Amino acid sequence: MTAHMTDPEAVTLPVADIRRLAMAACAAAGAGAAAAASLVDATLSAARSGCEELGFPHFLQYLHALRDGRIDGNADPSIERPLPAMILSDAKGGIAQLGFDRAYDDLVRQARMLGIAVFTQKNSYTTGELGYYVRRLALDGLVAFAATNGPALMAASGGGKPVFCTNPFAFAAPATPPESPLVIDQAASATAYFNIVRAARDGQAIPEGWAMDGHGDPTTDPEQALRGVLLPFGGYKGANIALMVEILSAGLSGSAWSLDATDSRSGREIPRSGLTVVALAPAAIDPHFARRHSAYLARLRDLGVHVPGSRAGSPVSGEAGLSASNDPPSTKSGASRRPRRCRPQERRSSTRRPARLPFSSR
């Protein structure tokens, strides 16, 4: 396999085997069966969609948070319906994915019946790959938008203090097979936080305009950036979008503002992140929306336009394989060890040695 030639430390396993190992790792770290299933499903979706850093490298961060008590692995989210088109979830210190899973069928049903439905959630750990939430809805024929916040990492302007998280937002729209849904998932910061971590790990400089050091000066040193703050993309325009995301996620749900959220990588307190997902039923207005959308995306590609999410429709099944490195990354920012990589493979491949996840019962 290509992955074996480019990375001698990588092995390839069927998804079913990776799922089993990941579930065992979650259980050993303190997650209940429901939380483990939701987390593993989301992790596999990120890996299969090509979002490597938010797949199994980020999964390890969840395991450490479970072990250290920042995530309640047995939290039982409460779901309320204040209005027919609004669903409120309290994650109660658990993972964001479980509350979304609990409300998912109701969210889809209400969106199809009413034309629009809103899911909003408070008091969870950070949400992971935000595209996961909207991608699922697009695969069920809905247009979706999502917003989330977390601990403050980004200043609103040069020289300022951190007031927002990277505050990502995601959008997805359905298409007709074999076209994959359009999936846009991006941060309000000039770059995602994991790009800074990766640059520090690889010893590479970062572009100007990404971050400032601890003294408030612009820096191209990722190590200094990790001690400082990120910057919004497009100056005040990115800061405005970060503020909008903050209001939609933390404000609407009643969760912690980024200014008040605790560190997601240390301590024992949950960051109390907020998440809001809006689902729309385009077929209620145009029954041929997905077909028109697919044709439009094809025209854009013919003109050389990059269309995000082109790999997002690949199913997660036991017949496909993922490659994974045996070397788990350090959870410290700027670690020199390579992160576990999980990339989609077209077929199964045997391995010379078993892949192990931290906290596995094996």
Image (tube, rainbow, N blue to C red):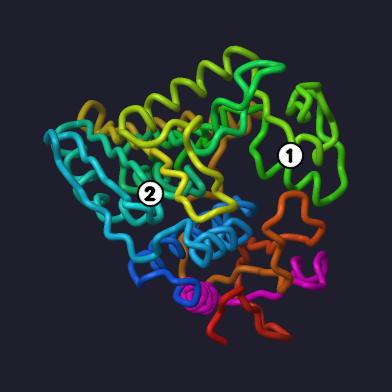
Q: Can residue 179 be seen?
A: no
Figure check: 295 above or below 344:
above
Residue 50, image x, y percentages: 60, 52
Residue under the point 80% across and 67% down: 7
Q: Is residue 11 visible?
A: yes
Q: Name the residue tied to disc 2.
A: 136
User: Which image quadrant for residue 80?
Assistant: top left
Judge the density around disc 2: few (<14), some (14-19), many (≥20) Cα neighbours within 10 Å.
some
Residue at left offset 50%, top offset 30%: 259
Residue bounds of the magenta highlight: 1-26
Does residue 189 lie above or below 314 as drawn? above
Packing grade of label 1 (10 A; few <14, some 14-19, many >=20) is: many
Asked if the residue under mark 2 is in contact with the one under mark 1, i.e. CB atoms within 8 Å, the reply is no
For residue 225, what is the image quadrant? top right
Give the camera-side residue of 64 and 172.
64
Asked whether residue 38 is drawn in magenta, I would say no
Q: Residue at left 22%, top 26%?
A: 285
**Which residue is tagged 1?**
226
**Chief secondary structure of the magenta portion:** helix
SS label for mark 1:
helix
The C terminus lies in which quarter of the figure? bottom right
Query: What type is the residue that disc 1 sits on?
Result: Leu
Q: Position of residue 236 (x, y in %)?
A: 60, 12
324 vs 38, nearest the viewer = 38
The amino acid on which the numbered mark 2 sits, given as a three-letter code, is Arg
- Which callout, 1 or 2, points to the residue nearer the camera? 1
Residue 59, position as x, y percentages in the image: 56, 61
Q: Which SS class for mark 2? A: helix
| Residue 24 is covered by the magenta coloring | yes
Does 346 appear above or below 25?
Answer: above
Q: Which mark is residue 162?
A: none
